Image (cartoon, rainbow, N blue to C red):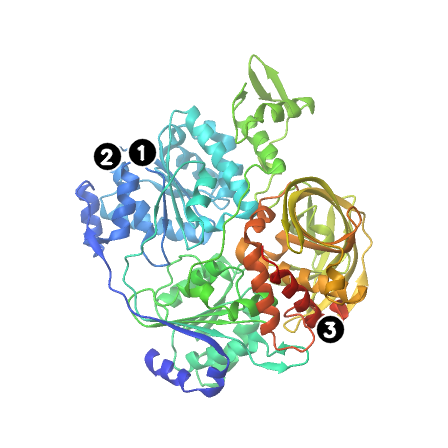
Amino acid sequence: MNIDQIIDALRSNEHFMNNITKWETIAPKEGIYGDIPNYIDKRLINALNRKNIFRLYKHQNEAIDYITRGNDTVIVTPTASGKTLCYNIPVINSFLKDLTSRAIYLFPTKALSQDQVHELVNINELIGGGLKVYTFDGDTPVNARKAIRNVGNIVVTNPDMLHQGILPNHTKWIKMFSNLKYVVIDEMHQYRGIFGSHVANVIRRLKRIAGFYGSKPIFILSSATIRNPKELAENLIEESVAIVTKNCAPSGEKHYILYNPPVINKELGIRSSYIKQTTKIAEEFLRDEIKTIIFVRTRTAVEILTTYLKEKARKLHKNPELVQGYRGGYLPLERRNIEKGLKNNSIKTVISTNALELGIDIGGLDVSITAGYPGTITSFLQQSGRAGRGVTTAISIMVASSAPIDQFMINHPEYFFGNSPELGVINANNLIILINHIKCSAFELPFKDNEIFGVDTTDEILKYLENNGILHHSEGQWHWTESIYPAEEIGLRSASTQNFVIIDKTKKPENIIGKMDYFSVPMLLHKDAIYIHRGVQYHVDNLDWERKKAYVKRVDVNYYTDAEMKTTINVLHKDEEHKLGFGFLNYGDISVRSIPTIFKKIKLFTHENIGWGKIELPEIEIDTTAVWFEFYENFKTVQNLTDDEFICALRGFGNVLKNIAPIHLMCDLHDISVATYLRYPITNRPAVFIYDNYPNGIGLSRRFLTLYDDILIEMKELISLCPCKEGCPSCVGPELEVGQKGKKNTLKFLNLILSYEH
């Protein structure tokens, strides 16, 4: 059967259709074109013609025009809409006018960098050569680095290498920084939260060094669809940007199918395994050798699905080599061969982590299946965009797991096909992150008196660093005095510099497989935790708190661990107080003292609680930002609930809040925390706190303050739509945590809040 016949077969499959929450068909669309601008160099126009590009999409013309006129620009259009040409054409055109012109391209992954270099090299050959394009990352040979620094016109790298390898060594990059015309930041939506807050500071340092050498580069950013692309771009580069959002590329007919596995235990709300359901669906496409990509969240899931589908291929009397996994941990040659196999049709089904989510060229695919909500709508759209990268018919299926966030999203298709609710949030002025990058910047160039680095209080920070023996003030400048190299000590994925190393002792010799920040360790690396590294499970045999080392051993178990923290919150300063019908909604600074108490063993896929253990670790304290609900004393009485019922309702409220808020805040579940109080000690009132899980905050709770109405409504919908009777892990939480009437009491609690006029 061809793809259209399979669509008809799926529609007539009653069992399949019974589990569909939405089947959205997007009609094919003609492209809207314009001529290649006449100010583009004839050699480049000829090269484009030789690639069968004789016209550009209107949005490409718009972007090229903005950039050529010197505007910092952000392009926000879907996958396969030609964003690459939006920046390659003006950058190469600038080089053809001025052979000394330089550009830095920032990509979040090495694979994407390699793909883009290949495209640039191809265009360079077609224009007659002369453009020097190089990748500069951790894999670049030492003997090649000097040549790249001296002659590279376009240096393709990533934020981590820019931070640790290029900026601190800027004196070796004088030709680059004195002639820097463009900085391209691809996949901008990846730069949010802690990572984005760090990258914004790396950009500050880049601009400072470029200015020292007399250049002011134009920034070109590209992004998948999010709610606030202009705001995020301007927060990242701290410049006004022109924005291009209207997609004028052609597209074929696209079928989006949202599939919720059937309930197999209504009492507990347990659904059939989403991995098994994905296997059944993928088998139908494998049967007819329809080219399919399946995205999963972990490396373990890649291997499980690959094993299942290879076995299905044998039963269908097909070569099992038609099915291949693709993930981090495979050797580069293995990954290149899989990419080649997809292009030449020798591979028909590939199972991947998000390693293939971004725009790596793997040829035309007919079907994409996303197994488990990938965390953001942006990621889902990126993944679904891998199918139908032309004008042919394509199918994109999302199979939900039992997790609360999956269950909410699968029942709210408007989020996938309407306006994205997701906000890219960063806080470049988080004090810990800011101080770390001021250290890096001072190492790179001395600060002058009254120089601003992000905040007006830069001088105060410099004085603080001098008092701690890190800087020395002399003749109006602040000089680095330490012997250490600060960028080496600072990772871009964490707010803390006090990292623990994770040591795998499965085999001799033992080796370090990762690092974790100080504040995450108690939850994720306590003794007997199941630590998951790139999808592989490890048991934490020992945590040496003093030496900041965790010793782990590889295991294969059917559960993960979830730690419970005893948390004490002190309000340091209340910045805002909003009086509402049910009480108050406040925003301010808090101190959080936490000590882990126990951990639960949660069964994979069903989320059942199958055991527990004690945790013995010291208390840790962070200052951060929070929003908190404070309810009037009579709130419990109005609902006619006992103390036990009311605290269970509060817990249910907190559990659902923690799962719904990330949808809007575009953050991970671990980026925020929720704490509930039957009586908050200071006010003696019921209270629920939602706070940033990072020292000094990164702006997530502040954003929540403006979104809470929508979030409360969606919390009610999630609970109401869940098929369980009295509460389950897919909504308010298990009975052990929220009581026998947890679902009913949490709904009663929410309904009362929503009954008041805000």
> Residue shown at 75%/74% (left/top)?
740
Q: Which residue is mark 2?
A: 97
SS at circle 3: loop
Q: Quadrant of the N terminus?
A: bottom left
Query: Up-down: is 223 above or below 384?
Result: above
* Residue wearing tag 1: 101
**For residue 220, above or below residue 32:** above
- Amino acid at the residue labelled 3: Lys
Classify 10 Å Cα crowding around label 2: few (below 14), some (14-19), many (20 and above): few
Q: Report the residue marked by disc 3.
A: 741
In percent of width and height, residue 116 lies at 37, 50
Whether label 1 touches label 2, CB < 8 Å: yes
Report how far apart the C-alphas of labels 3 and 2 lie in the structure: 72 Å
Vertical placement of residue 758 versus 20, above or below: above
Left or right? Give the position of 161 relative to 71: right
Question: If you read the primary sequence from the N terminus, does the residue marked by circle 1 or circle 3 appear first?
Answer: 1
